[in-house]
Amino acid sequence: MTDNSLYRKDTGTSIALSPEQFERLYLSPPNAVRGNLRKTFSNPTPLGIAGLLLAITPLTCELQEWGGSYGNGVATLATYYFLGGMCSELAAIGNFILGNTLPTTFFGIYGGFFLAFGFTMTPSSGAANKDVFPKGPEDPGVMASLGFFAIFMGVFTFVIMIGSLRTNLPLLLTFSMLGPTFVIFGCSRLYGAQGDEKMLKTLQHAAGALGFASICTGWYLFLAEILAGTDFPIQVPIFDLSQRVPSATELSKRKRIVVDA
């Protein structure tokens, strides 16, 4: 009986990951990369996922003002630098070395977002400095600018969501909810800049709730990554989509077969 999870390369001497296993580990469809770097370096993807989750999760709770929290994430400022920022950038560099384009892109940009957001919330940066803006982060000019920043992060996430159609269902669900989260949060800042406190709070709470839902699927994906990375005897399903949505290369091959026939 053959094991469907593994297949042999043309050399007949080495065992490679199946497309589903590859996608489970790297959140990217298999690609042609020379060398054996994946056998040399560890998988950087779980590090990036964990960093983003540990930065986003408390932020979504604060946006909903759970447990009396407030401040729009200022209290957890350090997590933006050292978890959402640093860990994501390290994961982006690692995936860049391994040749994984999609995770390189989203880890790099989300890491940059948290570094930028954290720097903006740091008093010495100027944007949150009350000597420059009397109301600090709540200054109308700062709020409007952050609103536009968040909205275009939502646009970026939408594009990444399209790419994730060839990955797995948890990642697709995460991006499909995270994109609107950015847009709703951005709109809350724009309403706040106009002095509409009621809409600011309503949209802020909505963004926090939707963001929390998105990180729930993210935590599930992180569990799947850890179990796969440690070759745990029990694996959770990730509902691989890489074989359900054919690649451009595969479609091209099918067309050539039809023409030749």
Image: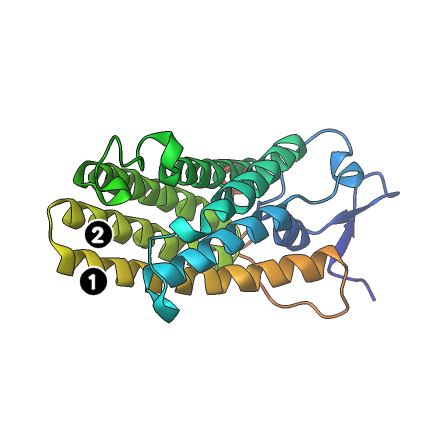
Q: Count the marks: how many?
A: 2
Question: Measuring 74% from the left and 43% from the top, which residue is drawn there?
Answer: 42
Of residue 261 and residue 53, the one placed in the foreground of this image is: 53
Mark 1: secondary structure: helix
Give the numbered dot on residue 179: none
Of residue 18 and residue 73, the one placed in the foreground of this image is: 73
Query: Does the CB distance between marks 2 and 1 fall below 8 Å?
Result: yes
Of residue 202 and residue 96, the one placed in the foreground of this image is: 202
The image quadrant that residue 159 belongs to is top left
- Inspect the image, locate mark 2, and give the three-letter code of the amino acid beneath it: Ser
Q: Residues within 10 Å of mark 1 (few under 14, many from 20)?
A: some
* Coordinates of residue 84 in the picture (x, y in percent): 51, 45
Give the numbered dot on residue 188: 2
Judge whether 228 appears above or below 138 on screen.
below
Question: Measuring 76% from the left and 55% from the top, which residue is drawn there?
Answer: 6
Residue 246, visible in the rendered structure:
no
Give the numbered dot on residue 202: 1
